[in-house]
Amino acid sequence: MLQELIIDNLALLKHIHISFNKGMTCLTGETGAGKSIMLDAINLAMGGKAESNLLTGPTANVTASFQLDGTNYHNNEAYQWLKNNNFIDETRQNTNIHTCIINRKFQITKDTDKKIIKSKVFINNIPASLQQLKQLGQLLLYIHGQHEHLNLLKETNQLKILDHYGQHNALSQDVYNLYNSWAKSKQLLETALEEQTKFFARKQLLEFQIAELASAELTVGEWIEINSQYQWLANQQEYIEKLNQISFILNGSTSETECDPTSPNLVQQANQVINLLANINFENKIITDLSDYINQASININEASFELHKFLSKVENDPLTLESLDKRISKLQDLARKYKTTPDNLANYYEQCQAEFKQLESQEDMISNLKNNLVKLEQEYKIKAQNLTLKRQDTGIKLSARLTELLKTLRLEDALVSITFKANNNTAPAAHGNEMCEFLIKTNRDQNLSSLSSSVSGGELSRLALATQVAIAEIEGTPSLIFDEVDVGIGGGTAEIVGKLLRKMGNNTQVMCITHLAQVASQADQHIRVSKSIVNNTTQTNIEYLNKQERIAELARMIGGLTITPQTLLHAQELLETAGH
């Protein structure tokens, strides 16, 4: 149950500290006093959206303290959620494991004319996310808003109520998740099939290109190698002539002539220099270094001469190889022009074609997998949806009977509620399952069952909304229920019955309601009056916990308005005493 609510700087509420009791609590006061702002504060504490009109200052703060079920807290959903998400440490001493404190802090800044709102969330003084707060809030309380009865007119909300009452929200979520997965998979398959024709044509082209390139037996680096060979063979005669000239300079011989001892050459000249240096009988570093250099040069010249002679001795004219290289070069150039690349890149292009071909093959595999997955998801969906259909049909009978019974207690003695189902127009999966439901009602004996939008008044719709909330609370046992003007559109004896029903609900769960009807307020176990006043030219909201005499005065105001007579006070006292207070 909600124990305390502390509000700072929220609209008219500068600083409010409210303590709530078990049972039924009512909040009364003039319109505009700030009652609904308190509900807005509770909604913020449960993770609701922060509207800019509520946050008028630079900061705001809402703290809500809840008392968990201390008698059997291990079976309490909120307690288990807190424990599973590490917001309760049972091993710590002096830890009140029965209490949950939620704190939400707001910081408001302005950027030109736009407000920038940032908030921080703490659960039991531990930082938490807004999503975590919303999850926890659903386990702690439920707020029945002013216009909740209007939501009954929508078939989608009627189906949600049915699933809520039947406690198959989890199954309904499974059906939705399967539909969502199916819809995404279907979209992927449709996109893949649209591209399949283009892929098929591309794959055929790649098959031809790969075959042609494979027959060319391409290798990386081949172009550079055969170009080098071709250049040598095509210019071999010129190169050999120049190499023979070099050989003659080195040692006086060529590939075609023996060494001419009379012809000066580098080998002979180097040897002459070495002999001259050897005949200088004077030790000097320069002469020594010079001798070393010339000796090394002589060695290098001899080795170069030897290797060149060896090479020239093996050179043969090879016109067949030259012709073969010419044909190979022409083929590679033709392929390169055809595929708009360079000859030295053909091998890489071939590998790219192979990679793309494999990717297209995997695309076909993907289409096959998508088809199989779609069939699998449809089968899983059908099983879950059919199970949900059976549960909904059974729940429809039970909820119809319970709502009819509750409406009779709310002075609609001839009311009858029937929940019917409409199957989907096609057999494809749908987000809501295989069917939608519709609440049909009649409130008079001589009427036929018809839809809510065509047959019920505002007051009757309000009573049906209350009946649905009571029915769900009986099944679900939400720790705290908050009603914002649930009595709209009703009055007189019906209002008293509504008050009694809320009070009866308060025996099992905490009930809080904002009301303008004395008949409802008189039934409350705790009565809080909300008013506003002007302090230093600033409007602020005040709260008062009313004792019996103050309650009588407040009830008389609610009955009589501006003029309160002794008879009005007696009527108010009678209402309070009839309620057992």
Image: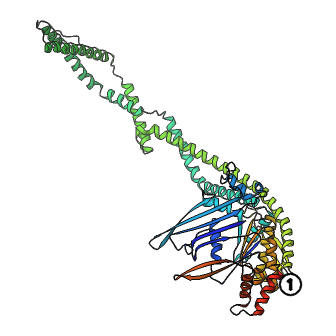
Residue to which mark 1 is pinned: 444
Residue depicted at 12% across the width and 12% down the height = 284
Task: Tell me where residue 186 sits by quadrant.
Answer: bottom right
Above or below, 549 against 567 in this view is above
Task: Tell me where residue 137 sits by quadrant.
Answer: bottom right
One can see residue 488 in this view: no
Residue 123, horizontal then vertical, whole percent: 63, 59
User: Residue 515 versus residue 268: which sits nearer the camera?
Assistant: 515
Q: Is residue 128 left or right of residue 456?
A: left
Above or below, 561 against 374 in this view is below
Q: Is residue 263 left or right of residue 178?
A: left
Above or below, 427 against 115 in this view is above
Above or below, 540 against 291 in this view is below
Residue 438, horizontal then vertical, whole percent: 79, 73
Residue 449, horizontal then vertical, whole percent: 84, 79
Q: Is residue 103 left or right of residue 110?
A: right
Quadrant containing the N terminus in the rendered view:
bottom right
Tell me the kind of residue under disc 1. Asn
User: Residue 156 versus residue 329: which sits nearer the camera?
Assistant: 156
Residue 115, horizontal then vertical, whole percent: 50, 71
Residue depicted at 57% across the width and 45% down the height = 359
Quadrant containing the C terminus in the rendered view:
bottom right
User: Residue 215 versus residue 486: which sits nearer the camera?
Assistant: 486
Which secondary structure, mark 1? loop
One can see residue 362 in this view: yes
Disc 1 residue crowd, few under 14, some 14–19, many 20+, Cα 10 Å: few
